[in-house]
Image (spheres, coloured by chain):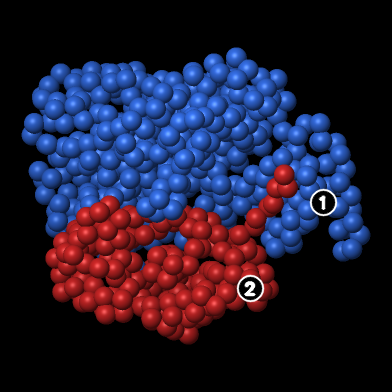
Chain colours: A blue, B red
Amino acid sequence: MGKTYEIRDPIHGFIELNEWERDIVNHPIFQRLRRIRQLGLTDMVYPGAMHTRFEHSLGVMHVATKMFDQIVKRRQNFLERELDFTTGGLERDRVLVRLSCLLHDVGHAPFSHAAEGLMDNDPKSNKSFKHENYSGAAVAFLMQDVVENHPLNQNYKITVQEIADFLNGRVALGRVLLWRSLVSGQLDADRADYLLRDSHHIGVAYGRYDLNRLLVTLTIALDPETESPVLAIEDGGVHAAEALILARYFMFTQVYFQHTRRAYDYHSVQALKHLLMEAQRGGDFANKEAFPPPTSRENMEQYLKWDDWRVLGMIHNGLAGEHGEILLKRQHHRRVFETPEVPNTSDLEFAEQVCEELNDLVSFVDKAESSWYKFESADIPILLRPGQGDEELTKLSRLSAVVSGLKAVSRTRVYVAIENKEEARKKVLNLRLKKEAQV
Amino acid sequence: MKVSLDIPWQRYALIAELTKQCQEKCPQFGKTVLQKMVYLLQEVFHIDCGYDFDIYAYGPFTPQLLQDLDLVEHIGAVKIYPVASMSGGYEIKPGDQAAHLIEKGSDFLQKYEVKKAIETLVDEFGCFRAKDLELRSTIIFVQRDFQKHGKPLSAAGLIEIVKQLKPKYTDLEIQEAIEELRKKRYLETIA
């Protein structure tokens, strides 16, 4: 056993690292995360939201390890007998999971998820690249030495390509893909960490739930409908699972999709777009308003130069155009209309009429579904009567009236520039009165 | 510049239409079947429905479709019932507002290529159970993922990867599913 190091963390107490992980944390690409705030410009609404991706990444590695250890402790026989894992393979998987979770966010753009819309299109899939693709590329192109050539990797021979495949969800991983649910899924360590961490820093209680109870009841089972392995919670953790779903719902509606916070997301993206265009004018990239695609070492070196400090400095120096000015003066666009959280057909049709009526006054439309943190009503599998010979997998929504009553949030909002707020509100009011008169 | 609301009526209408068309043919049209049918419609029949599928141990999946399904249920165009049997899952049935929603998405659903693709999809895949569709959609995802990354798989390589993801299937079951997809020309070249 090599030397270990502890980092104090406000959520989990101490987070333990080995020498290999400490060297990765000390790498400039990981240190850049100290300059990427977890929630962009959320501090304009919740002043405490100054925490960064640096501490979150450590937290995700810590929670994912606890999840992994719990599953193996409880279900090693199942993993080996039913899913063909081996003891040696599991030991190696644990290392891969830790490193992948530690590095899962190194590809974030400035202002975190807000700027994800400025990532270029992937010609292979014709879809936009995501931050996971940038994380994978950062590791693969720029961290090979610290990952592959570290003495502690001698027994495992973990490659940067494997970590990139894990982050990108590539099927080349084979059975190891199962563990990707620990960083991207209904019961993942990413979500488990950010709900608690964001609540703590912002000063709200919405995201709190019983992580320890969830951890001791976490398990793995086969879905009876498809015979696929899924992460599940034993029946003793039903209320902790309920609390996790409610935490996601409250955090989404009260924090991540808070209307002013979303306006700041919009302005920060527009300001960044302006800065990108200026910086890349005359350059080689086809799309000057987007970040360089994560397809080469050179592109990644360019991309990783962008961080919050650089962008905030440019905004402060008046280089970020109209939206940079809006940010400096806090004259953000105003919400003048929104649908219910779960709209019906007539709500959506009315929203279309509002947009038509406001016409050029509309500066932007925001939809819950376009937010990275969107709240969809995906279920959590629950294992009933574990270890009693007649165990059965069911869904949380079948056991919980609270959860079965929750619907995905599909709210749409319309924003206008501050100087158009009164005119727009009058138009919306008139339209509403007209509609009511018709009814 | 005029900003439009772009409500994805075509996606909502597609859910209602697939629910309607699969009722007679599909043994249990639930959330898993819906996910895999829409995946096949996008990937195999090249109908851009606007979903971004990721792969998990349980096959291709997109949370956006669950979000849309929730809304379509709220609108009253489908009804979702939990199934009491041990196989679990859900059953999705048409709701009172199905016709209205399908009408709202008729520009999309009535396009010749979309109509034809849905008909063929339901005809060719509508009779499968969730687990059969999950196997087939996983095979297609694996094959295309390797192809896309410039490393086309041999038949044996494809079986090996799918077997690792779906250990409950025998090599023979996977091989038969691959053969069936290949005969129907739904599987691109295997090295």
Q: Quadrant of the C terminus of chain B?
A: bottom left
Q: Amino acid at mark 1?
A: Glu
Q: Is residue A205 left or right of residue B149?
A: right
Residue A205 location in percent, x, y? Answer: 55, 31
* Front-lying residue, A70 or A39: A39
Tell whether B97 sits left or right of B83: right
Q: CA distance from mark 1 to mark 2?
A: 25 Å
In the rendered image, the vertical position of residue B25 relative to residue A312, given as above or below: below
Left or right: B67 in relation to A350: left
- Give me the disc on residue B106: 2
Indicate the quadrant containing the N terminus of chain B: top left, top right, bottom left or bottom right.
top right
Q: Amino acid at mark 2?
A: Ser
Q: Position of residue A76 (x, y in %)?
A: 17, 49
Residue A78 in view? no
Q: Residues within 10 Å of mark 2 (few under 14, many from 20)?
A: some
Q: Which residue is mark 1?
A: A357
Q: Is A258 drawn above or below residue B9 in the view shown?
A: above
Q: Residue at x 30, y 32 (%)?
A: A297
Residue name at image x 27 percent, y 58 percent: B147
Q: Is residue B22 above or below residue A35?
A: below
Residue A305 screen position, x and y as percent = 41, 23
Residue drawn at the location 36% of the way across and 75% of the way down:
B129
